[in-house]
Amino acid sequence: MQLESKVDRPNLDNVDAEIRAYIEHLEQQLLSSGARKQAESRPTLEPSEPETTINIITVTADGRAKRTPRHLYVRQRRSGMGVFDIETDEALPPTILCEADANADVLIITEEGRIFRTPVASIPETDGRGRGTPLGDLIQLNHSERVVSLLPTDDGLYINLISERGRVRHVRKTYLGPTMTQGIRYHKVSEGGYVTGACWSSGNDDLFIATRKGLGIRFSEKQVPNTGVLGMRVDPDDMTIAIAATNEDGGMLVIGHDGKGSIRLMAGFRKNKAPGAGGKVVLKTDQLVGVQSVEAGNDVFVISQLAKLIRFSADEIPAKTGVVQGVNCMTLRADAVTAVTVSRADGSGQ
């Protein structure tokens, strides 16, 4: 005989009033206890920040983009599972995260080295999970041309492009103002392959380049001529995945596809005297997917192939001067990290 999993409440109309009152009291106690246990089982989340015009922009592999106000993302603890963000197919995962003010413009950089400028407000805003709009509706992309990076405007004096074979190109901010020629090309694919990443720099920074296999190099940006230079020698079975600006006192957030990451302090990562050398190990990983300069007090945003996004404080990641495997930044189940961005107090995420 199989017992029923649910017992219906019997009719208490013919029960003595005092007994009925006692039963109803016990029912209320059980309900209160259940609600309390449910609340205690939920993860502890820090309160969201005050309302802000800073947005987090998410872009998928097929070029669909949406933006969501940053304050709607609740800060969790490192190694959490995150919340669902953009609506997309698993085969077309999120590949770009960018932070920018809703009242400003954003630079859109493609794999062919073309740069466009468009208002952040032209990208659809969603309060939560949204499907997004093709960036091809906002800018004139060539057939099958992919977007590889979004950068907020006015966050430095130079844009630096890195190609998959390690060639760096320096572009002055003055060429990228409101009246810029849309879609102008700043890189030849024949010279180093497609562009894989971009970053702002001040003109006095060091440039940090990283590859998919977890190798990196650091050198002064002053050694990059206007025509470009080979920044890093990359093995044939490897390719670059990112470029970032840093300095001797800086730290670099590096994260792998398995959700493990570290903050590599540049004090323990020797600067090369010139660009063009091979890389040194940055993180022990099968596949490095994200590199961002980071400071104390910054927030980290990480998104996965299944479009789960987590926000947590960078201070929760131990800073290291040497090579490590990293700590768990995001818990993944049949999933993988695909993109990361760092949120700064002034909204100048790269």
Image (cartoon, helix red, strand yellow):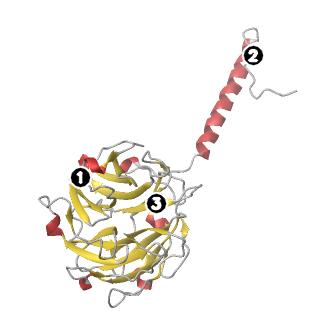
Q: In this view, does 284 lie above or below 23?
A: below
The residue under label 3 is 338
Residue 70 locus on image (x, y percent)? 36, 51
Residue type highlighted by circle 2? Pro
What is the C-alpha distance between the residues marked 2 and 3?
A: 55 Å
The residue under label 2 is 10
Q: Earlier in the sequence, mark 3 or mark 1?
A: 1
Quadrant assignment, res 177? bottom left
- Closer to us: 173 or 191: 191
How packed mark 1 is, by other alpha carbons closer than 10 Å (few <14, some 14-19, many 20 or more), is some
Residue furthest bottom as drawn: 273
What is the C-alpha distance between the residues marked 3 and 1?
A: 24 Å
What is the C-alpha distance between the residues marked 1 and 2?
A: 66 Å
Residue that appears at 30% across and 55% down: 143
> Which quadrant is the C terminus positioned in?
bottom left
The residue under label 1 is 139
Q: Is residue 343 above or below residue 123?
A: below
Q: Earlier in the sequence, mark 1 or mark 2?
A: 2
Secondary element under disc 1, as helix, strand or loop, is: loop
Residue type highlighted by circle 1? Ile
- Closer to us: 300 or 131: 131
Please give left or right for residue 34 compared with residue 157 in the image: right
Residue that appears at 36% across and 45% down: 132
Labels 2, 3: front one: 3
Residue 31 locus on image (x, y percent)? 65, 31
